[in-house]
């Protein structure tokens, strides 16, 4: 199966399911839920995000971003997944997983990002979401390396990556401009043992 066929299957099949979660591609109809998710978590995510421009938290802006992210996922340029609780309301978003900057050629690698609603941290949900996401990415997008980087003080994120098998590969000074400040990052990655050359 090609990456494009795998993303189409993800879309047609209604997403990935885990014991407690549904992970699905963004779509325009989810714009109000996306706006609510990012707005209620604005303070929680702020230390790990670029500063948001005026108008960022509007339904219209989220509709446009949802369309762009869905198209990128279906074209195989990235993978954007929205998390909902299997027990909760289907249209409530409680987290997101993003695979971006997919580079093919000799590299076959991409960056992994993730965020979880403040109310759901500490239940093992992101671990569950990432296990399923990484399995999908390695099996169907056939990437060789997933890179995930975190600020040194983000111990929760560091613990999560270590539990998933990511190895620390380095330390980058002034790596990302987050919340208006250049922040150092711990660089980690996970290799795909089943990569098909
Ligand atoms: C990073 C982030 C996603 C981690 O969320 P999380 O809920 O801690 O992640 P996990 O799914 O690994 O959950 C682990 C915690 O759940 C607990 N837990 C409870 N039930 C569990 C279960 N059934 N299975 C596994 N862990 C469980 C674990 O003990 C652990 O808690 P502890 O760290 O206090 O020991 C979250 O803190 C977040 O969104 N932060 C803001 C954004 C951010 O930092 N993004 C990443 C930037 S690099």
Image: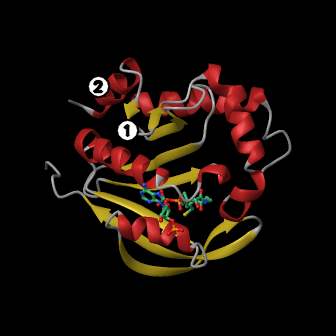
Q: Secondary structure at mark 1?
A: loop
Q: Mark 1 or mark 2, which is nearer to you?
A: 1
Q: Which residue is mark 2?
A: 5
The image position of residue 5, as x and y in percent, is: 29, 25
For residue 18, the mark is: 1
Q: Is residue 50 visible?
A: no
| Structural crowding at the residue carrying mark 2, measured as other residues with C-alpha within 10 Å and reported as few (<14), some (14–19) or many (≥20) | some
Q: Quadrant of residue 183?
A: bottom right
Residue 172 appears at what percent x and percent y?
52, 79
Q: CA distance from mark 1 to mark 2?
A: 21 Å
Mark nearer the N terminus (1 vs 2): 2
> Which residue sits furthest right?
54
Against 8, residue 3 (above or below) is below
Name the element at disc 2. Answer: helix
Q: Which residue: 78% across, 41% down?
A: 56
Location of residue 80 in the rendering, given as x and y in whole percent from the top left corner: 49, 39
């Amino acid at each position: 199966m090609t990456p494009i066929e795998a993303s189409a299957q993800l879309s047609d099949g209604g997403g990935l399911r885990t014991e407690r979660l549904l992970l699905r591609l963004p779509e325009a109809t989810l714009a109000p839920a996306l706006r609510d998710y990012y707005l209620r978590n604005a303070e929680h995510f702020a230390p790990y995000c670029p500063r948001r421009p005026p108008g960022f938290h509007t339904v219209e802006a989220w509709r446009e971003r949802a369309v762009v992210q869905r198209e990128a996922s279906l074209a195989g340029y990235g993978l954007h997944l929205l998390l909902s609780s299997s027990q909760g309301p289907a249209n409530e978003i409680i987290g997101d997983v993003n695979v971006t900057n997919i580079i093919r050629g000799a590299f076959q690698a991409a960056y992994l990002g993730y965020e979880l609603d403040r109310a759901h941290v500490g239940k093992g949900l992101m671990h569950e979401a990432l296990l399923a996401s990484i399995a999908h990415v390695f099996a169907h997008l056939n990437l060789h390396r997933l890179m995930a980087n975190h600020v040194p003080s983000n111990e929760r994120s560091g613990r999560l990556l270590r539990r998933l098998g990511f190895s620390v590969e380095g330390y980058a000074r002034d790596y990302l401009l987050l919340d208006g400040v250049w922040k150092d990052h711990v660089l980690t990655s996970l290799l795909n043992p089943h990569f098909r050359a």
